[in-house]
Image: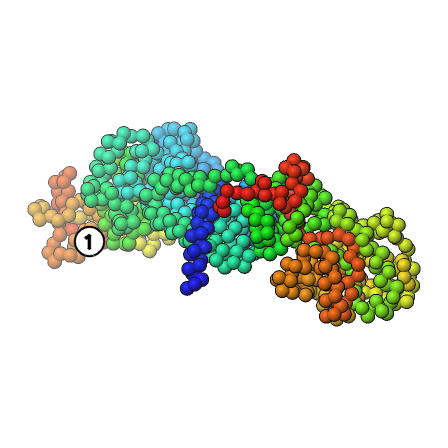
Amino acid sequence: MEQQQSLWQFMLQQSGKLWQQTITHTGLTFTAVLIAVFIGLPLGVIIARKQRFAAPVLGFAGILQTIPSIALLGFLIPLLGIGAFPAIAALFLYALLPVIRNTYTGIKEVDPAVVDAAKGMGMTDAQILLKVQLPLAMPVILAGIRTATVISVGVATLAAYIAAGGLGEFIFGGIALNNTNMILAGAIPAALLAILFDLILSLLQRIQARKMRRLVVIMPVIFLVLSSFYIFSATDKSLLAGFTPEFMGREDGYLGLKSKYHLNMRNVVISDAVMYKAEFDKKLDVISGYSTDGRLKAYGLVTLKDDKAIFPPYYAAPLVRKETLEKYPELAPALNLLAGKINDSIMTELNYRVDYLKQLPEKTAQDFLVEKGLYRKAQNAQKGTVRLGSKIFGEQYILTNMYKMLIEGYTSLRVETKTGLGGTKICFDALVNNQIDVYPEYTGTGLLVILQPQKQEVAKLIANRDSLYQFVKKEFARKYNLAWLPPIGFNNAYALMMRKAQARRLNIKTISDLKRYTDLPKKR
Amino acid sequence: MIEVQQLTKRYRNTVAVNNISFSVTEGQTLVLLGTSGSGKTTTLRMLNRLIEPTSGTIFIHAKNICSQPPEVLRRSMGYVLQGYGLFPHYSVAENIAIVPKLLKWPQQKIQKRVDELLQKLQLPPEEYRNVYPAALSGGQKQRVGLARALAADPPILLMDEPFGALDLLTRAAVRKEFKELDELKKKTIILVTHDVQEAFELGDQIGLMDKGKMQQLASPAELLFYPANGFVREFFNQHRFQLEWQSVCLKKIWNDLPEVRNHMNATLSSDQTLWDAMEEVANHDTDVYAFDEETGSARHVTFECLKIAIQKQKQQG
């Protein structure tokens, strides 16, 4: 019972936001359905008359229907950006098939004798359509609109992924924060909306065909009123943040922003894939990202200084098996050639070349080493083999390629690369189980993913980059007999970022500076 | 009145109607008779341009029907079809009012006409005006369908299997009413049916069709006694006995019957068919007499006399 009470309390506490999201949800749904009816109904009428268009039109609408909703939103973002517009477009595409198909079926199912009689009595095509076919098809058409509405209420929860709001914001926020009450506070009203709309439309549907004539007029009015609930509000001028669901849920993320910085930003939940582009397109003002992400450079973004140190440092350094270091003493000096050579902006630049310009990691690595005067031709000697591993993203590929070139250039060792070892856990296990000898790891990851110490200890450790490095180095040596070599220099940590121009204009350099522009009167 | 010349309807691989010509004079009923696929319905639907002919012309009142928009043409012809095609979302009164409304009659005139028709078709207006078709019996629907076709008082009535959806008993009863309806007496009617009995009962002329061709167009008696070809003869074989007896009036064989002076207890008139006479004879133990008003003469009707008369008719053919 405690759970239910606290859910009720949560909903009361959030009632303002809940009400607003419910209205947004309703608005999104009915705007989309209304457009779908305006376009789908005439289309259905046309294909019922011109039979040869029926298969292609229904087929196309059917294909739209089979696209997974997340994927459809993904397709629409490059075209329409983020926010209500693409969300309504996606909902509209989903609502289209039931409306077209039921209009088509409804008209086709009108007794041919009735249509024949209408024609034989001298009704024109338009009269037959308006006075006979549409009124008689109306229950079936209404069933289609009903289906479209219920589908839309469901799909509209996904609108939260592209910052269009709606009850999905509660649901995804709740999932990211592992907060059951929050999930339910979004899911239950969404389900109730679906049931409510279904019920209302089923009542309309039961009205007999002969009374349909009046209904045909009333229906659009009802829909217009419902969709007008939704006002494209752009009145709020405070900065808008877009955070990934993961960031929303982490102590070293949104929760830290709230507890340490007391930052109450207007924010939307958005997927990582579209976040940077949306920031660039000025749809968002602040986003959460990784400090060496190539898109920082691609989209002209700057990171804000974490002046209260809530994001743990993620300094990269080679993590090596001690046995290998003892077996090949020349290995450590070769790996250390890179130590301190790559800072954040250099790494961002290198990532930019690989992730954005689509250069080969190998070429990027070689170009960099040549530029720094570190490149040497491979000796092609056969003294022994060192196995290099990497996780499955561009930055790791670049680093691994650099190490390969350095080892083969400066020692008589041969290198075997095992790239694409998925995530941290896979790389680490491969290292411990003597399947690889070296891979680049990040101090923060070593601490939070591998060592997983107590919360208080984490808070203490992450405040200082050097003490964290020393702690990780000591613990890895003790527990796993692994060595952390000196860091490469850059810190690929969580960061808040903004467009350069805007940050300069607003004079925002640190996260604390944000407070000047984001503090809202009260929690909404 | 209606003049059809060399009418042909060809579909991709088939010829539905093959070079048909006929004419119908005012007030006459022409029955197009044939099996399914004979082209009779196609012919009918070309008359109100629900189907456009491949070639041939149709004149109504000496006016080519293609000279006006099809909608206007159709509003001037009543149309009754097998399923009636009543609008399920319209009440009985609204259904009947469709064509007058299309013709923009004033509301009052429409209402008066609807009530008048309902009265004539024995559907009390107070009771049926606001009833929806779903609540009507088959026979009632048929009458509403007929009333709807008659609403604007069109001179021509096209009927496609108008009794086809009724059971046999109802059909006979409705047909009887139909024949007696004064609204229909002056109409030019073209009726399509596959029912031989119906064709003989209702048709002044019968056009027997097969495979898109008009096999013979003649009066019922002519079809029976002077068949144009083997097909026509074959077609009526099954019903021949009854049809022959039905297609001849007593008047026609009047002089072959023995004359009697006493006509006070005559139960038959000279307008009745031999079939009626035979039924009368079979149902009476006593002698049966017939009376002819025109000549004031009476005849003694016996089964033997009727049989001889029929045979004589056939020999003439």
**Quarter residue B219 falls in:** top left
Disc 1 residue type (three-letter): Met
Q: Residue at x 35, y 37 (%)?
A: A121
> Which residue does the numbered mark 1 point to in the structure image?
B278
Q: Residue at x 12, y 40 (%)?
A: B296
Q: Is residue B128 above or below residue B27?
A: below
Q: Chain of mark 1?
A: B
Decide if residue A163 is in sight here: no
B160 on left or right of A306: left
Q: Residue at x 33, y 56 (%)?
A: B238
Residue B157, percent from left and from top: 32, 38
Number of numbered discs visible in the structure rendering = 1
Q: Is residue A482 above or below residue A289?
A: below
Decide if residue A518 is in sight here: yes
Please tell me which residue lies in front, A58 or B153: A58
Give the structural element (helix, strand or loop) at label 1.
helix
Q: Is residue B63 above or below residue A209?
A: above
B161 on left or right of A48: left
Please tell me how crowded label 1 is: few (under 14), some (14-19), or many (20+) other residues with Cα within 10 Å.
Answer: some
Residue A469, percent from left and from top: 74, 60
A342 on left or right of B105: right
Q: Residue at x 66, y 48 (%)?
A: A307
Residue B32, percent from left and from top: 36, 44
